Image: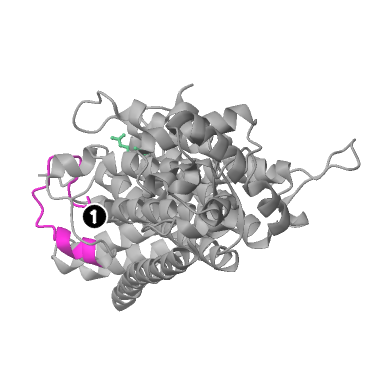
């Protein structure tokens, strides 16, 4: 038993026996590992504390290693010696400081479980940032919806005027979607926040490691038990990038709508969220929203790259994996930025309620309401549909109660007003009345939207609590680990 991970040969010098050649740069992840520098130090500390507690290394050596790690931390990522990756470089830096005993740090582990732990440790915080960004966006959507709860606007299908709705109803449709995005990210968080540490290369270790202890010291919710799974699994990256890409796609739809609404003069972006042209002096362009829309491309790319890289990888560890997690880090950064910008744009935009109301009835968008009215009076819906469709076609969407009645006489052989009052038809033709009539659950009628804002706000608070609990658990673990380290240093 030599207690070594597959790549541990005791000294940094011996490790250099490979990969000193032209492939050196290609092999190295050191630059990109900046992202997991702090994570690796935490993982090293928890591992060393556990090794000492288990009597695998003595307390004095643990103290020296932990003191060296403090010093490595102070020098920062840029102060690291050359290395194939941050794990190797930190180990070399420790050995440089305290001599060969520094090599005891890598007892009973491998870079395989180490890197998997570092990625999960770092990504969970990033996911929490993303979760909080989605929550903040939902807050913005809720308050804008509340503010414009009764503002009538055109609703579209196939980008054609379809039925009038309200700005409140429209905005809450995105709040609902973003709420599911939050839920997906919370799910991804749950499966990310488990510790692979102690799996070693993949095959476990003869040392009496306490995997639950390192998991707790690092604030994980538990361990990834099967050691081969622990070292190999990256499905949490597929899940995280999938959830991020899904959210980015949600954002892209919102951004696209707002670009279209700006084009129609329904909405004006605040100057902070607009750009001008270098040549056309009059221009105010919705560039921020176009970039939000564009981020979906990056995020979908990250999810695709992740799955493509993982496809068909054999067990257990393969170096391809080194190229996978950066996609998640890139995606999470871009998606958080896009979420923040989308929220800022919505929060500061001004909706032109008059322009929206004027457009709400365009293209005879109240036609469905008229057909519904006739059907409610007992005319079969298909017949009502035909009456209204014929009127729409004949009068090129410029209809009135009298015009519809004329068509009804032709189609059904009797006047409309045998079934409904003239007043009710006029009301059905009015966009605001049309909206008010659609009070089915989740519909645009004002009191429905008000109730929906309340429910959405409750959902936001619940998710806020969930995110805070996770933050607190991480922070508590961070303090516990620091206190444990202090007893040795
Ligand atoms: N930098 C590597 C990665 O990110 C660390 C693991 C190296 N392990 C190995 N067996 N070569 O995956």
Vertical placement of residue 238 versus 461, above or below? above
The magenta stretch spans residue 183: no
Magenta-drawn segment = 195-216
Q: Left or right of 307: which side holds 36?
A: right
Q: Position of residue 201 (x, y in %)?
A: 20, 40
Residue 319 in sight in this render = yes
The residue positioned 37% from the left and 41% from the top of the image is 379
**Residue 10 to residue 310: above or below:** below
Name the residue carrying label 1: 194
Q: Could you tell me which residue is drawn at 31 percent across and 50 percent down?
A: 188
In this rendered view, identify the residue nearer to me: 357 or 484. 357
Split into 4 quadrants, where in the image is the N terminus? top left
Q: Quadrant of residue 227?
A: top left
Q: Nearer the viewer, residue 87 or 215?
A: 215
Residue 94 visible in rendering: no
Q: Position of residue 370 (x, y in %)?
A: 49, 45
How many numbered discs? 1
Quarter assignment of residue 167: bottom right
Q: Main secondary structure of the magenta part?
A: loop
- Image quadrant in which you'd find residue 94: bottom left
Camera-nearest residue between 221 and 382: 382
Q: Is residue 200 magenta?
A: yes
Left or right: residue 254 compared with residue 229: right
Q: Does 121 sit left or right of 133 as displayed?
A: left
Q: Residue 329: percent from the left, percent from the top? A: 46, 45
Q: Position of residue 403 (x, y in %)?
A: 61, 38
Where ligand 1 lies, by quadrant? top left
**Label 1 Cα crowd, 10 Å radius (few <14 / some 14-19 / many 20+):** many
């Amino acid at each position: 038993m030599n207690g070594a991970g597959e790549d541990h040969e005791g000294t940094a010098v011996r490790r250099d026996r490979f990969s000193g050649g032209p492939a050196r740069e290609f092999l190295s992840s050191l630059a990109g590992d900046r992202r997991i520098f702090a994570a690796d130090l935490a993982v090293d500390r928890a591992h060393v504390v556990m090794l000492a507690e288990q009597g695998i290394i003595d307390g004095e050596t643990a103290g020296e290693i932990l003191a060296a790690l403090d010093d490595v931390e102070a020098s920062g990522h840029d102060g690291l010696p050359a290395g194939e990756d941050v794990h190797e470089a930190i180990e070399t830096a420790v050995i440089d400081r305290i001599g060969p005993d520094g090599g005891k740090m890598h007892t009973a582990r491998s870079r395989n479980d180490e890197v998997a732990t570092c990625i999960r440790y770092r990504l969970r915080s990033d996911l929490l940032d993303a979760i909080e960004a989605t929550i903040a966006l939902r807050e913005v959507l809720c308050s804008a919806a509340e503010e414009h709860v009764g503002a009538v606007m055109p609703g579209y299908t196939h980008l054609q005027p379809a039925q009038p709705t309200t700005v409140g109803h429209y905005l809450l449709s995105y709040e609902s979607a973003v709420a599911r995005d939050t839920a997906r990210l919370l799910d991804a968080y749950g499966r990310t926040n488990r510790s692979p540490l102690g799996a070693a290369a993949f095959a476990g270790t003869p040392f009496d490691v306490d995997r639950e202890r390192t998991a707790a010291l690092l604030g994980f919710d538990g361990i990834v038990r099967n050691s081969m799974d622990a070292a190999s699994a990256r499905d949490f990256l597929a899940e995280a990038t999938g959830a991020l890409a899904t959210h980015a796609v949600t954002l892209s739809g919102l951004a696209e709508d707002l670009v279209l609404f700006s084009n129609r003069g329904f909405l004006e972006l605040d100057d902070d969220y607009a750009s001008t042209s270098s040549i056309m002096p009059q221009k105010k362009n919705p560039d921020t929203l176009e970039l939000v829309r564009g981020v979906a491309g990056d995020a979908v790319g990250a999810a695709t790259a992740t799955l493509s890289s993982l496809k068909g990888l054999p067990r257990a560890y393969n170096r391809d994996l080194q190229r996978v997690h950066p996609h998640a880090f890139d995606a999470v950064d871009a998606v958080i930025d896009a979420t923040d910008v989308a929220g800022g744009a919505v929060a500061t935009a001004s909706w032109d309620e008059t322009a929206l109301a004027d457009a709400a009835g365009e293209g005879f968008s109240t036609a469905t309401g008229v057909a519904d009215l006739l059907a409610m009076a007992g005319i079969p819906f298909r017949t009502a549909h035909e009456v209204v469709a014929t009127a729409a076609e004949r009068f090129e969407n410029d209809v009135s109660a009298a015009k519809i009645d004329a068509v009804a006489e032709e189609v059904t052989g009797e006047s409309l007003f045998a079934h409904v009052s003239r007043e009710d038809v006029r009301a059905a033709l009015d966009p605001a009345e049309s909206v008010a009539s659609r009070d089915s659950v989740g519909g645009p009628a004002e009191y429905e939207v008000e109730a929906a804002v309340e429910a959405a706000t409750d959902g936001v608070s619940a998710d806020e609590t969930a995110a805070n609990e996770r933050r607190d658990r991480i922070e508590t673990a961070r303090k516990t680990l620091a206190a444990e380290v202090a007893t040795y240093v």
